[in-house]
């Protein structure tokens, strides 16, 4: 097996260490010096201190805070765009994918679809925060963000990037969660993120959910890889 995006092949190839070792998942990013603001949110300082004390346990709370960090980013991203652009701006951009599905008569407006996505992200933030509190942890706060788009077209393109990062981040982090109930909750978010990604792909010019390079298996991203992308949008803590 040589397909690196195939999770079974990755195990056979011995290339899955970063995804199966909780400590290296969290500390690898610190070694790379990436995303200082992001790392401070997800508790890497705490992780490193624990390691020095001979305790290398990364908790489910750490992993949930990592997910919450990304959900804050997503929630702020859509909230901001829906404040900048009006319903007319969104409809002016067009929605070829939705028209394809509804015989040329869009059943739902583009703006309302993005409102729905925003509401999902806000719900993810609220739920993850309360679960972390219930577990005795401290939920990370939202940061200050700066998203590089200046048109609806660029917003949609960036949305695709952000959703793909979210999907791959959950795929990378979910296997590290020890509590089965929390794993089930993470998977229930993961599939919603995948639907966001699919809808946004339909928004793009090609208006198809699958690109030529898409295979039967999506890649999971390690924390290092996710931080390298997400930290571009975080300007302060
Ligand atoms: Fe989300
Ligand atoms: Fe999303």
Image (tube, rainbow, N blue to C red):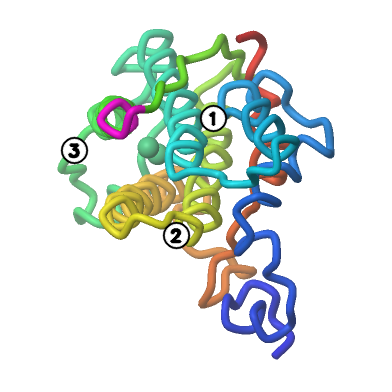
Residue 147 screen position, x and y as percent: 60, 19
Q: Nearer the viewer, mark 2 or mark 1?
A: 2
The CB of the residue at mark 3 lies under 8 Å from ligand 2: no
Task: Specify start and end residues of the magenta stretch as a single range.
Answer: 132-136
Q: Residues within 10 Å of mark 1 (few under 14, many from 20)?
A: some
Cα gap from disc 2 to disc 1, whole angstroms: 17 Å
Residue 74 screen position, x and y as percent: 45, 28
Q: SS of the residue at dot 2?
A: loop
Locate residue 39 relative to residue 140 in the image: left or right: right
Name which residue lies at 72% across and 42% down: 27
Which residue is under mark 1? 153
Outermost residue, front side:
53
Q: Please identify the quadrant where the C terminus is shown.
A: top right
Q: Please identify the quadrant where the N terminus is shown.
A: bottom right
Cα gap from disc 3 to disc 1, whole angstroms: 19 Å
Locate residue 38 relative to residue 203 in the image: left or right: right
């Amino acid at each position: 097996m040589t397909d690196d995006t195939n999770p079974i092949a990755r195990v056979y190839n011995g290339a899955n260490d970063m995804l199966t070792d909780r400590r290296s998942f969290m500390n690898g990013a610190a070694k790379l010096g990436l995303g200082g603001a992001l790392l401070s949110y997800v508790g890497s300082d705490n992780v490193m201190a624990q390691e020095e004390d001979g305790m290398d346990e990364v908790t489910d709370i750490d992993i949930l805070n990592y997910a919450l960090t990304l959900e804050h980013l997503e929630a702020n991203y859509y909230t901001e765009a829906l404040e900048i652009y009006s319903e007319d701006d969104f409809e002016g951009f067009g929605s070829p994918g939705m028209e394809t599905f509804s015989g040329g008569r869009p059943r739902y407006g583009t703006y309302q679809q993005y409102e729905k996505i925003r509401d999902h992200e806000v719900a993810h933030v609220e739920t993850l925060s309360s679960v972390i509190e219930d577990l005795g942890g401290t939920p990370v706060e939202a940061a200050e963000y700066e998203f590089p788009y200046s048109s609806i077209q660029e917003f949609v393109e960036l949305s695709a990037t952000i959703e793909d990062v979210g999907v791959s981040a959950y795929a990378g982090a979910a296997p590290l969660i020890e509590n089965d109930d929390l794993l089930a909750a993470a998977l229930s978010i993961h599939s919603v993120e995948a639907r966001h990604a699919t809808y946004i792909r339909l928004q793009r010019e090609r208006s198809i959910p699958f690109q030529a390079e898409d295979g039967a298996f999506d890649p999971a991203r390690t924390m290092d890889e996710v931080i390298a992308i997400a930290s571009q949008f975080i300007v302060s803590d």
